[in-house]
């Protein structure tokens, strides 16, 4: 069985939920305190043993390529000022090969993944979306790779969401479970409110076999008028088992505003440079708000 060595990070979406901030800046470059969100995703891939990463970019996404490139002028400047820790930080992701491909038009997540088919070739591969930052003792992608190694089948990361949230996600219809791993009868993208077959939602982490590409190729537009990866996975599941795995880890939804702000607060409260001052500020703020309510 081939090993999972490659990962696709789709980053060509329009980021409309963060407009106007994302008019000229990629959503994936929005910082959580001092690190762009995409750095957390690349880090998870590296920690999961991925050797080759391809980022699917689009119009206005040049900043992502610049971010993972060396910046000699900046490096020299930091070195001359003995800013060693900052030097280390800016080169954190330089020990993995990152490639880029452009999705000419944002036709949907399925189409973005399809754009990377030549890079993947005939191997199983990982997909990591930047909308979810997942912090876990064992990186989420590695948990899914372990499941793939056991089953030889595609595995999709899921976690439980509330009833009122199911319409925003891809949802699975589970048949049976074995130690957090589910056999699945159906994968449904963004089911209408009240129609979701379960509360187990797809969380932006996938291990897929290369057979998925032939299903994406013929996939018609689905929810939101986009070519949906979930719809192609549903078809793959009819000919090749696709499992869902309820991974262990805390997931931060940075793809929407409130999730982004909560993530920023959580990460800032762990940041040695600012955590004490932020904690005092938040305490004061809560008191003030309580006074007025
Ligand atoms: P989203 O739908 O959450 O991202 O896609 P978006 O379209 O950028 O954001 P909104 O909804 O307009 O605010 C999930 C992931 O898939 C990528 C996005 O970049 C994001 O990481 N994506 C989506 C593509 O690469 N191409 C697409 O055509 C659509």
Image (cartoon, rainbow, N blue to C red):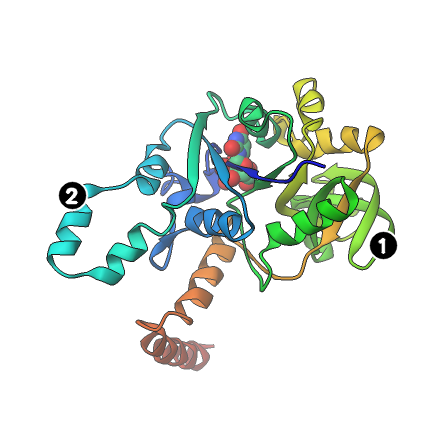
Q: Which mark is residue 113?
A: none
Earlier-in-chain disc, 1 versus 2: 2
Picture coordinates of residue 140, whole percent (x, y): 61, 54
Q: Which mark is residue 73?
A: 2
Q: Is 109 placed left or right of 187 in the picture?
A: left
Q: Quadrant of the N terminus?
A: top right
Q: Quadrant of residue 79?
A: bottom left
* Residue 121 placement, left or right of 197: left
Q: Determine whether label 1 and label 2 are within 8 Å by CB.
A: no
Expressed as whole percent of the image width and height from the top left, the position of residue 116 reads 54, 26
| Label 2 lies in ligand 1 vicinity (Cβ under 8 Å) | no
Q: Position of residue 237 (x, y in %)?
A: 80, 33
Per the model, the C-alpha gap separating discs 1 and 2 is 54 Å
- Residue extending furthest toward the front: 1
Q: Residue furthest top?
A: 218
Residue 180 horizontal/vertical position (percent): 78, 58
Q: Secondary structure at mark 2?
A: helix
Would you call the spot at circle 1 few (<14 residues within 10 Å), some (14-19), or many (20 or more)? some
- Residue that sits furthest to the left in the current view: 80
Left or right of residue 188, residue 203 in this image:
left
- The residue indicated by pointer 1 is 177
Up the image or down, 261 lies above or below 185; here it is below
Q: Residue at x 78, y 47 (%)?
A: 194
Residue 196 appears in the picture as rendered: no
Q: Is residue 239 above or below residue 195?
A: above
- Between disc 1 and disc 2, the foreground one is 2
Camera-side residue: 160 or 280?
160
Front-most of residues 226 and 230: 230
Which element is circle 1 on?
A: strand
């Amino acid at each position: 069985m081939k090993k999972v060595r490659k990962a696709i990070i789709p980053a060509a979406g329009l980021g409309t939920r963060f407009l106007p901030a994302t008019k000229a800046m990629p959503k994936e470059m929005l910082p959580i305190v001092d690190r762009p969100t995409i750095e957390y995703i690349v880090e998870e891939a590296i920690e999961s043993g991925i050797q080759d990463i391809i980022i699917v970019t689009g119009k206005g996404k040049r900043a992502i390529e610049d971010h993972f490139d060396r910046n000699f002028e900046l490096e020299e400047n930091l070195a001359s000022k003995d800013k060693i820790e900052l030097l280390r930080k800016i080169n954190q992701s330089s020990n993995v090969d990152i490639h880029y491909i452009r999705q000419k038009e944002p036709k949907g997540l399925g189409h973005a993944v399809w754009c990377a088919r030549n890079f993947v070739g005939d191997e199983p591969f990982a997909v990591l979306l930047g909308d979810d930052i997942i912090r876990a003792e064992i990186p989420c992608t590695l948990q899914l790779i372990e499941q793939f190694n056991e089953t030889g089948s595609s595995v999709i990361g899921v976690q439980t969401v509330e009833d009122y949230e199911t319409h925003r996600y891809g949802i699975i219809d589970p048949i049976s479970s074995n130690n957090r791993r589910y056999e699945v009868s159906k994968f449904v993208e963004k089911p209408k409110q009240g129609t979701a077959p379960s509360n187990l939602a797809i969380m932006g982490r996938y291990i897929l076999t290369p057979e998925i590409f032939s299903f994406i190729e013929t996939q018609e537009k689905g929810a939101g008028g986009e070519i949906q990866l979930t719809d192609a996975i549903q078809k793959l599941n009819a000919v090749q088992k696709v499992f869902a795995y309820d991974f262990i880890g805390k997931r931060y939804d940075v793809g929407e505003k409130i999730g982004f702000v909560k993530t920023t607060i959580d990460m800032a409260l762990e940041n040695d440079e600012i955590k004490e001052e932020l904690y005092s500020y938040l305490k004061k703020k809560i008191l003030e708000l309580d006074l007025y309510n």
